Image (cartoon, rainbow, N blue to C red):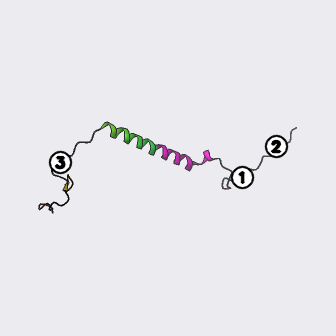
Amino acid sequence: MRKPHKHRKQAPATEPGTTAWYRVPLVWFALLLLVAILGACIHLVVLSSRHVDPEIPHGERVFRIPASAAVPGSPPDARSP
C-alpha cells in the first residue's frame, strides 16, 4: 500500500507575491478601460473626418468679434459696444 501524499500548504491569497498578474481582476478592468478609450478616440477621429463642418456665415463680425484686424492709427469703430 502506498502512503498518502502530503499536500503542500498553499499560501493564503492575502499574502503578497502569491498571485499572478493575470489573475487580478483590476488589471483586466484597467486594460479593458484603456482599449475602450483608445477605440472611442479612433472612432471619433474617423467620424469627424467623414463629416465636414458647415461654414459659419460671417460678414464684418463673427460672434460680435471683428473679422479683420484693426489698422493701427485708425479711430475705433463707433458701433462697438
Taking the magenta stretch, the answer to whether it contains residue 67 is no
**Dot in front, 3 or 2:** 3
- Horizontal and vertical percent for residue 56? 21, 46
Q: Quadrant of residue 44?
A: top left
- Residue lying at the far left in this picture: please name it: 78
- Horizontal and vertical percent for residue 11? 72, 52
Which residue bears the numbered disc 1? 11
Tell me the distance, in whole angstroms, between the alpha carbons under discs 1 and 2.
18 Å
Closer to the camera, 62 or 33? 62
> Which residue appears at 16% of the width and 60% of the height?
74
Tell me the distance, in whole angstroms, between the alpha carbons under discs 1 and 3.
73 Å
> Which residue appears at 15% of the width and 51% of the height?
60
Which residue bears the numbered disc 3? 58
> Which region of the structure is painted magenta?
15-35
Which residue bears the numbered disc 2? 5
Q: Residues within 10 Å of mark 1 (few under 14, many from 20)?
A: few
Q: Residues within 10 Å of mark 3 (few under 14, many from 20)?
A: few
In screen coordinates, is 69 left or right of 29?
left
In screen coordinates, is 17 left or right of 1?
left
**Dot in front, 1 or 3:** 3
Where disc 1 sits, the SS reads loop
Taking the magenta stretch, the answer to whether it contains residue 27 is yes
> Which residue appears at 39% of the width and 40% of the height?
43
- Residue lying at the far front in this picture: please name it: 73
